[in-house]
Image (cartoon, coloured by chain):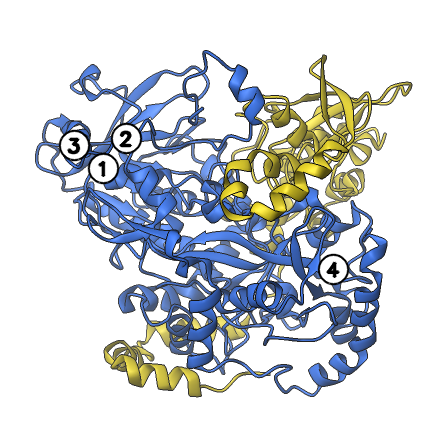
Amino acid sequence: MYPEYMKPSLDKVAQSRNKRFELAKSGKPVFPPMSAEEREEVLLKFHPDYKPESRRKIRIGPNKGESITTEVADILESHSRISPDIFDLSVPDYETDVLIIGGGGAGTAAAIIAMQQGAKSIISTKLRLGDANSMMSQGGMQAAVTPQDPPTRHYLDAMGGGHFDNKPELVRALTEDGPDVVRWLEELGVVWDKNEDGTMQVLHGGGTSRKRMHSCRDYTGAIILRTLMDEVRNHPEKITILEFMPVVELIMDNKGQCAGGVLYNLETEEYFTIKAKATIIATGGYGRLHIRAFDTTNHYGATGDGLVIAYRAGAKLLYMDSVQYHPTGAVFPEQIAGFLITEKIRGAGGQPLNKFGELFVFPREPRDVESSAFIRECIERKNGIETPSHRVGVWLDSPLIEMLQGEGYINKQFPAMHRQFIRYGIDITEEPMLVYPSLHYQNGGIEINEKCETNIPGLYVAGEASGGVHGRNRLMGNSVLDYNVFGRRAGLKAAQYVKSVKLGNLSLKHISEYEQDLKKARIRTDRIAPVLLPSYTPEDVRKRQLTAHYEGTLR
Amino acid sequence: MATETAIKKEFIQRFKPKVKAKAKKEAAKKDFVTVFIMGKAHKVPADATIMGAIEYAGYLIKRGAGCREGFCGACATVYRLPGDYKIYTGLACTTLVEEGMWLSQLPAIPGQKALYDLDKLEPNVATIQKLYPEIFRCVACNTCTKACPQDLEVMDYIQAAKRGDIEKVMDLSFDCICCGMCAIRCPAEIVQYNVGLLARRLYGKYLSKKSPELRKRLKEIKSHQFDNEYKELMTMKKDKLKKKYYERDLES
């Protein structure tokens, strides 16, 4: 239930609805989309990335001297969890063809394809298999399948959304593989939303010029990932799953090839070694670092672990200065602050409104532009709505969707969103939601080519952990596609690579060398990474935890 | 979440000094309730979720937290309330605490999954019967439905599975988050969520109507129809590409 003082503003939203409905029905843009100059201006002035304190120079490693996101620089300039000398690498605890680090969308897709190529794999995952942002994607997956939408149009949309910084060969892979991913997933048993005649139901997303958003109600990620997980679990003879066993360092060999990793059992606190002919990092993003103190839409384990272990081993990062804030994170009620409100809401006709019930931005600008416009409306123009806990947000008018698409549409297409709010007495078929940008996605990551190769032989990266696909801003629906396209490619390439590679002697020398670099750069820190888990322990409790050193995270 | 906000104090100090002063005033008049986490009493904010309360009390959750938004099913929790004989089920991330609540998280749910090659299955009742014969032990007690934190009609989809109505199982189980509450409460020892998952996969692969447009597009890509256009776009100067982007038409 919304507090009484919000009623006048809610009334204004209801009053303007009929007029907005007529405009939306006319087929014309409900608000003029921004020009290139307007986009640039709102980004420079209001996007959190462009605040001076948001970035700093990293002092060591392959990207030394580059300005990157402050919180990422912090975890990269940190100590290892292990002392490399303790490990006897001549007798590894596990041996496999492909080590897959991360049990989300990219990891499971890679494991399935690697298995079909005859390679054995181990999936190491910090939490359970499937505890990943992939599980939480709601709105959909882009893929160009309609006659009016060639994959090259998808390419153009993605490049423009990413401010033309995307690596062209990666965007081609993304968009050209798209339709086949739709087929592949359906053959694995994904239940896509369809029209009566069997054609795919497609909607718009932010920054799309054609309707190409494929969905499974608003449980798109859950349906896809559970299908992939089920397939992985059907093949225990080929795929070993190690849960609550994150990789905390990579292992190299004396030829500079990646040769496996060091595992940490989160529960028994034991360490193990894995020797692998190829390694795929599929660890996802970093929302739980709470960059710029933002709330996040991300799952519990999204702490950027893959970046840290790859960087220490010498992998190059790309666009690590760019963070995605999803325009529509919930701000009310307090219990769900930061939670994702799917962009599909705007794809289906939902509109962002200020406290006067007025549109102030085209509802489907690319995410960074849309988010910046929300921040401008709240901070500069002071047209936001304040919550009882002093957050501020704008309305996201969902009842309009029922008018545009027909009664019952929300219950059918947005069961998760409806559930999320009805628990707190807000019926989104009748009342709008209150939203503000929430930390959502790691735009950059470990640099890859279209084969998912990095600058380290034997090390592949797929999904959110990688950088280059989305330039400096990802469009909605391109991450679900990303983890499928590049998860499959990584699985294939790694499986081919293991047939010929010869590993030398295993080594953790790079850990000691990185430690030396820290010292040489005079970096003094008690920070230890990978972070593994965020801590939400209150400060007064932490003060009493006298003997806790670090366990999953720093205390 | 309230507790997450509270502990991000250091950030708030840095970025939102005004908000902090206000929040402090309000914290003073904040209401608290007593909950029993695995039997131990803790005072926690009255508006906290169960997950927020557990963390507020000082626990670092390893098993029992995942997406934290109600999609992954990692945080299945059972609880009782004072003066009430009933056993309640809920997700720790989306259920609010209540005064006197006695709660315990379930770190993992034992549930068997049949192994199968989807390519060799037929979408019918015989398949379900072979892989999950225990569903025929269902006594229609409806406990699974009552235990579902998603309010799904679990018993109805198990009944539909017994009839081989795969479409119905798919539809009714679509929003399942595999938290396992149904399975842990079922007197017939059925693992309902795995039956739903099998039925959805059978439906998606065999029973959903196929898209002719998709088939056509795949052919076009296979015959390299877009190669030239890709080449042109990939080598285009940024200015030209930018112009092309901003001039593109929008599908209404």
Sequence-first tag of 4 and 3: 4
Task: Tell me the residue at 46%/18% (across/down).
Answer: A267
Discs 1, 2 touching: Cβ within 8 Å: yes
In space, the residues marked 2 and 4 are separated at their CA atoms by 45 Å
Sequence-first tag of 3 and 2: 2
Q: Nearer the viewer, mark 1 or mark 2?
A: 1
Is residue B54 left or right of A299 when viewed as pictured? right
In space, the residues marked 1 and 2 are separated at their CA atoms by 8 Å
Q: Colour of chain A?
A: blue
Check disc 3 and give the amino acid type: His
In space, the residues marked 1 and 4 are separated at their CA atoms by 47 Å
Check disc 2 and give the amino acid type: Glu
Check disc 1 and give the amino acid type: Arg
Is residue A236 left or right of B41 when viewed as pictured? left
- Quarter of the view holding residue B197: top right
- Quarter of the view holding residue A523: top left
**Residue A29: % across, % down:** 61, 84
Q: Is residue A240 above or below residue A438?
A: above
Residue ID for mark 4: A412
- Numbered disc 1: what chain? A
Residue A312's tag is 1
Residue A493's tag is none
